[in-house]
Amino acid sequence: MKNARVISMITLTLIAVLSDSKPTLAKRHKAPPDPDLIYAELTKAPAKDVARQNPLESDPEAIPAGDKLFQMHCAECHGEMAEGGKKAPSLLVDEVQKSTPGTLFWLLTNGVVRRGMPVWSKLPDSQRWQLVSYLKSLSGPPKPTPDQGDTKH
Amino acid sequence: MMKNYKMRLSRKYRFLFAPLVIMVSLIAHAQESPYIVTYDHYLEEPGNLEVEYFSTFGTQRAGNDFHAFWSEFEYGATAWWTTEFYLDGQSTFNQSTLFTGFRWENRFRLLQREHFMNPVLYIEYEQTSGADKILKEVEGHDVESDYATPNSIARQEHDHELESKLLLSRNFHGWNFAENTLATKNLTGGNPWEFGYALGASRPLALKASAHHCNFCPENFIAGVEMYGGLGDRNSFGLHDTSHYLAPVLAWNLPNDWTIRLSPGFGLNDNSHQFLLRWGLSREFSGFGEAISHLFGGRR
């Protein structure tokens, strides 16, 4: 009986967590995060981080590699073309594109945990710089097209 | 009548197959750590579900070797809270195969940003039988001889445990270093708090990503080592009558969304199992929470 109560409690909690936008459980509608609040995080980067240079800036592989990483880890929320989605804002706007590489690296490293963006420091520094290279390329001249279909074994 | 029956049948199948369809369509790319016992400070991405299967083969002196296994369902409730449900089982050679209990774990990220050291609070409730052998953690005075009890006797013992851990972890020059301290209280009987530890270090084989999709690129492999063991209990804290293990670990993060982990573990003293071979298979599904909400009538 006691076991049944514990199992019921856990099951109900899991259901509530998994379906927290179900109207009968919670009337509220989850609004997408306010982009301005997220872009505002970019202004919080410390000066020494803002000033950091991208060590892979002249690496021709950095943009296609960053593109691959973006599709793997970021496109799910930010959209395949970084145009923004229901869960995360566009990365094509001036707030992002005019940020320094160091600022973008800082944001990727620290995330915006309160607003749902995880920290991405689990990707090594080089991969985060590759992502920064890709993000900065979105506002520049046409980027080199990665050979998406080529699979090396 | 027939139409109603078909509709009912159609609804029934929709309900049965919907989770499968959702899972196939929600594949996410994982970058998983190689640890089996140690936790780093990274939580599941919000709304994602990771389904994992782990297996442990263990040698047993003065008893039969065993194969213990567990399934994990890990869900990112928010960017700072991950909740996880485990189902445990084991098969002792020449004895029997048993379901040995369940665990419900929660991890909370305590700081918003990355720091020199990043703390995560871990709280778990577990309800297992004395026959549980998954060795997901080693605590107190856990020793090899505890696992020699035949299943028919061990299964009669029922444990309700509350387990807390402080997970500390940091990344440095591509390496991850993690330290976990655990305190466990068996809520049945007057058992004292028991303590244990886990340490881990790991690094991808390459730090830069290649520009092409590939299965065998070195950045897809993360190698490392972990060490874990008991630290006694409140009445007798220390290393006497405790067991300890050292285990190389390897994770292969496949671009097709699977992660495979392998870890041969070696007992470091006479109280430890001589050899533990662990492996695991996991797959991550993105936007699972949103899809389930939608299935139950929530808005997308």
Image (cartoon, helix red, strand yellow):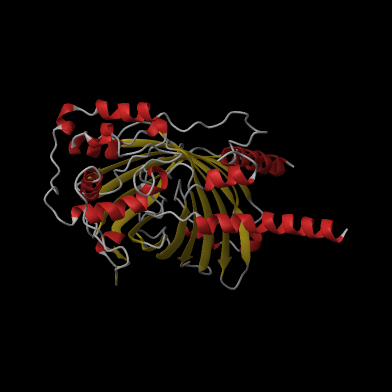
Total label count?
0
Task: Pick out the residue farthest to the left.
Answer: A58
Residue occupying the point 78% across, 56% down: B7
Residue B51 at x, y percent in the picture: 50, 55
* Pick the front one: B283 or B195: B283
Left or right: where B277 falls relative to A148: right
* Pick the front one: A143 or B22: A143
Say which quadrant the N terminus of chain A sits in.
Answer: top right
Say which quadrant the C terminus of chain A sits in.
Answer: bottom left
**Quarter of the figure with residue B12:** bottom right
* Pick the front one: B26 or A145: A145
Task: Pick out the residue farthest to the right.
Answer: B1
Residue B221 at x, y percent in the picture: 30, 61
Residue B98 at x, y percent in the picture: 63, 62
Residue B28 at x, y percent in the picture: 43, 54
Residue occupying the point 25% across, 58% down: A145
Q: Is residue A8 visible?
A: yes
Query: Image height check: is B288 above or below B116?
Result: below
Left or right: where B250 falls relative to B26: left
Left or right: where B283 falls relative to A143: right
**Quarter of the figure with residue B14:** bottom right
Left or right: where B231 falls relative to B24: left
Q: Is residue B154 visible?
A: no
Task: Pick out the residue farthest to the front.
Answer: A141
* Pick the front one: B125 or B240: B125
